[in-house]
Image (cartoon, helix red, strand yellow):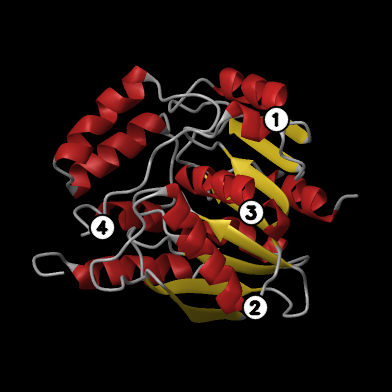
């Protein structure tokens, strides 16, 4: 990581992690794509729940606002995605390059944690990974929740891509902050979380796997219960289109639009009832 301020990133990461419950554990799980960092909380004998973060420098720690409540009913495992910003390493130059690789990586994480099957949740890009994994290995996923997932049911808005372009071409803390402030509409964000996004600018991550979109026929055949929560103020995609296409394709889906929240503000700045919705879904019939 020569040339990158790793200490600044680690300091910002640890500051957000400190918002987690005190009874947490940092785990390292070996996979074919290097060691994966997992943060765990909740009763050890509770059913497992794996959480996948959004892209960029979201990382596993960004679930801090939800893990205490989720940890009342589940053993929560929040994962740093292989090859992405965070504390997960690589096996030499090997990192996930295909959806099959991501599925193999997540299977290895679940095996390392000793979970034959689990509930699965993801935000944004993490939702895309979670949905693909569920489609390929439905027997390992009991219930799936998706928080404003990208590239699953609708494409990006052109305006979103145009605003993201300067940050993607030459990431700097200032450009990251400007983009986040634009997408969230100037709503006050947790300063520690925002500092982590800034510290992630220029992180030497691998190129993320972003294609393909899940096939409609595969979605129609999915028997796993799904909860889809869409951010009403998302500038990433059309919230109504995401919800309507999911209802048209998934046979066992519950959808809702979360008011007064944008795409990147999830899940740390979500409405107060987000944890209630999630726990009700996870513990429902």
Can you tell which quarter of the image residue 5 is in?
A: bottom left
Foreground residue among 151 and 137: 137
Please name which of the two marks, 3 or 2, marks the residue nearer to the observer.
Answer: 3
Mark 3 / mark 1, whichever is N-terminal: 3
Please name which of the two marks, 1 or 2, marks the residue nearer to the observer.
Answer: 1
Residue tagged by mark 4? 205
Dot 1 falls on a residue whose secondary structure is helix
Give me the C-alpha separation between circle 1 and circle 2.
30 Å
For residue 6, side relative to residue 183 (left or right): left
Residue 220: which numbered mark, if any? Answer: 1
Q: Given contact means CB atoms under 8 Å apart, are the residues at marks 1 and 2 in contact?
A: no
Give me the C-alpha separation between circle 3 and circle 4.
26 Å
Mark 1 / mark 2, whichever is N-terminal: 2
The residue located at (19%, 54%) in the rendering is 202
Q: Given contact means CB atoms under 8 Å apart, are the residues at marks 1 and 4 in contact?
A: no
Mark 2 / mark 4, whichever is N-terminal: 2
> Which x, y percent locates residue 85?
32, 60
Q: Given contact means CB atoms under 8 Å apart, are the residues at marks 3 and 2 in contact?
A: no
Give me the C-alpha separation between circle 3 and circle 1.
15 Å
For residue 180, side relative to residue 112 (left or right): left
Q: Given contact means CB atoms under 8 Å apart, are the residues at marks 2 and 4 in contact?
A: no
**Dot 4: few (<14), some (14–19), or many (≥20) neighbours within 10 Å?**
some
Foreground residue among 36 and 269: 36
Give me the C-alpha separation between circle 2 and circle 4.
28 Å
Mark 1 / mark 4, whichever is N-terminal: 4
Residue 98: which numbered mark, if any? Answer: none
Residue tagged by mark 3? 137
Residue tagged by mark 2? 114
Please name which of the two marks, 2 or 4, marks the residue nearer to the observer.
Answer: 2
Q: Given contact means CB atoms under 8 Å apart, are the residues at marks 3 and 1 in contact?
A: no
> Which x, y percent locates residue 200?
27, 56
């Amino acid at each position: 990581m020569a040339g990158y301020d790793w200490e600044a990133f680690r300091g910002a990461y640890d500051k957000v992690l400190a918002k987690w419950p005190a009874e947490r554990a940092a785990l390292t799980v070996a996979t074919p794509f290097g060691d994966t960092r997992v943060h765990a909380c909740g009763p050890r004998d509770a059913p497992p729940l794996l959480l996948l973060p959004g892209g960029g420098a979201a990382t596993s720690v960004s679930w801090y606002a939800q893990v205490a409540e989720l940890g009342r009913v589940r053993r929560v495992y929040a994962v740093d995605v292989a090859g992405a910003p965070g504390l997960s390493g690589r096996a030499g130059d090997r990192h996930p390059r295909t959806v099959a690789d991501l599925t193999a990586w997540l299977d290895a994480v679940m095996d390392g944690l000793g979970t034959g099957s689990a509930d699965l949740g993801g935000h944004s890009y993490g939702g895309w990974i979670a949905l693909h994994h569920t489609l390929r290995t439905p027997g390992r996923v009991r219930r799936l929740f998706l928080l404003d997932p990208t590239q699953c049911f609708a494409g990006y808005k052109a305006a979103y891509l145009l605003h993201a372009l300067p940050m993607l071409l030459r990431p700097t803390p200032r450009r990251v902050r400007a983009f986040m402030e634009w997408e969230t509409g100037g709503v006050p964000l947790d300063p520690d979380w925002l500092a982590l996004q800034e510290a992630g600018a220029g992180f030497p991550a691998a190129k993320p796997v972003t294609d393909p979109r899940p096939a409609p026929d595969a979605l129609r055949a999915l028997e796993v219960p799904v909860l889809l929560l869409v951010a009403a103020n998302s500038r990433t995609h059309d919230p109504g289109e995401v919800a309507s296409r999911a209802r048209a394709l998934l046979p066992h889906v519950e959808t809702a639009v979360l008011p007064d929240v944008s795409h990147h503000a999830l899940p740390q700045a979500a409405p107060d009832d987000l944890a209630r919705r999630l726990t009700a879904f996870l513990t429902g019939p």
